[in-house]
Image (spheres, rainbow, N blue to C red):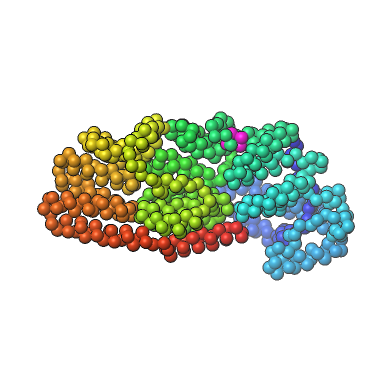
Amino acid sequence: MDEPPPPADHILRPHHIALLTILMMAFKDLEIKKIISEITSGPSADAEECSEFKIAIKSIHDDINKLDKMANFLGIFGFFCRRCYLTFSKLSFAGLDRLCQDYAAWCSGNSSAGYGIIQKDELSNDLLLFKTHADRRNWAQPLYYEAWEKGQVVGDENLAIENLRRFFEQRFHESNDSGFRPHALLNLVRMHYIEGEYVAASKLLTEAINAARTSGDRITLHHCTRFAVALESFHWLMIQPDIHPLEVLFDVSKLLDEENDQPLNAAFIKIFQAVGLYDHWLDVQFALPAEDLQWAQHAVQSIVWREAGCYKVSDLEENIVLAFTEPGSESNTRLSIKARQGNYNEALALLIDPSVWRGLIVHDYSIWAHQIWHVLALRATRRGQLRLYRELLLPRRPTGPFNQKEYLFNQLEQATLGIEYLLQAVWHSEFLCRFNLYRTCIILLADIGLEFGMSKRSRQILEEIMPQVCQLTITPSTVISIFDLYRYNALSLASPLLGASYLSMAESDFQRLEMYRAMNDVQYMLSIVYHNLDMQDERQDAAKRHIETGDHQQKLEMLVFDEEILKIFDLLATVGDALASR
């Protein structure tokens, strides 16, 4: 497909008159020579670039001094003045009157005056006295594509598709077939893919591939085949020089899907390939991707490192993204950063901050709203506020992935029913290098062993995993392992003081996680330990805390209304309305 020629038509705008006025005043006055000498008398005035500037600026006056010399297209100022002169000479009396009115309004502060779209209709367009072949046809304008992008941002699918159709139906060159139909289909495929409408995306993708092959558009065909790979769950992209780094990073999400049974090593390899491609784009292709793209691989690394159980490295990658990504941009990189477990207020403050949601498209807004709901639901279920969860939070759940077992689960009466699945989880998590899940499985396995009376073996398992668990951030599995370790020490007649220290650690951590029911059990057991040690004051304090925690737990369980949560939902509605009305 041939490259489209440059636009053959030219319309005089108010700022053209202002530029011509500046040129006329500058080169008519001989004082310009003094200005040139001032500019070229500074440091490094003998440099080659400075000498070329002196020669070029002196030749400009000769180029526009006379009308015949304005035809010298080697001077950019001469070309500009010549083109404005020719356009002005073609204007009719109505066109001159229109130009004067627009210029006067523009000088008065109306920035839109004189910048409207002029339809080239033979019956109604009387602005030109002399019309060339290019003046009789309407050429392609970017207005419709801008409306298409706005429709995508606000989530108006009908408006977006209609403006996309109108944009590609415009005249781009003299040929009858513009050859841009594959581009239109590729944009539609991308829109449906982002919205999660994979069936519609697959149908349009097949049509786009056939259209790209028919028109011989190799680049668009490559983009279509990459979309076809992205729609397949068990296929990954082969590394090629013209592949975008984000397309390689997207393969990481498929490698993290547990149904594909791929170890985390493959995900790290893809990250390294994406970093190498980004460097290739800068060093070899001399392409300059958006600045936010260089931080996307850090956001992906934070997720992968967290799956590998390296929480401190994950936190470091998260901090890099939050520190260097531009707040309020359309990039959803900041949304990819998960809030630290247990820090509910910090997580909510991070998500509600305007720098996170300002500039998001409607699709990313649903992700943002679902993350806020997830934090609220996790806090309510850990507190034991089941009525609040069922009656207030569940009816207001935004669209997005939802798994009931992440918040509540049914306990089995017989541990033997879950041992087989637990052993499978231990094997799979170790094989897939998902050590955060592996540690949780080991803790549950030790807990089940205690239920069967195998306290010695369970204690050995837990003590082997404790050095890894204690180095992590505070999570429920960390606290449970500390609590269980005390139970094993108690059954093995270990030092009661050591058990009391474990219980104190578990109590403070449960309090930080706001898991009051579990904290109540720990306080009860801690009071028993202090009683056996004849530590009366400590026993009384533990018993008092046990009663206070129980009362606080009962108050929370009775709550079905929370003004703070309702204010957050009002904020979600306000932000959604503001984003959709842009």
Residue 74 is at least partly visible in this image: no
Q: In which quarter of the image is the C terminus?
A: bottom right
Q: Image point 25% across, 51% down: which residue?
A: 522
Q: Which of 268/556 is in front?
A: 556
Q: Is residue 126 left or right of residue 282?
A: right
Magenta-highlighted residues: 226-230
Q: Which of 225/31 is in front?
A: 225
Q: Position of residue 419 (x, y in %)?
A: 34, 35
Question: In terms of secondary structure, what is the magenta stretch mainly?
Answer: helix
Q: Position of residue 383 (x, y in %)?
A: 35, 55
Examine the rendered structure and indicate whether residue 579 appears above or below residue 499: below
Q: Position of residue 529 (x, y in %)?
A: 17, 50
Residue 291 is at least partly visible in this image: yes
Q: Which of 330/452 is in front?
A: 452
Q: Is residue 366 left or right of residue 33?
A: left
Question: Toward which corner of the image does residue 537 lie, by quadrant?
Answer: bottom left
Decide whether residue 255 is among the magenta residues: no
Q: Position of residue 495 (x, y in %)?
A: 15, 43
Question: Toward which corner of the image does residue 25 lie, by quadrant?
Answer: bottom right
Q: Which of 114/233 is in front?
A: 233
Q: Which residue lies furthest to the left in this view?
A: 534
Q: Which residue lies furthest to the bottom in this view?
A: 108
Q: Image point 72% across, 60% down: which residue?
A: 15
Q: Image point 46% across, 46% down: which residue?
A: 403
Examine the rendered structure and indicate whether residue 425 appears above or below residue 338: above
Q: In which quarter of the image is the N terminus?
A: top right
Q: How many marks?
A: 0
Q: Image point 21% across, 35% down: which residue?
A: 456
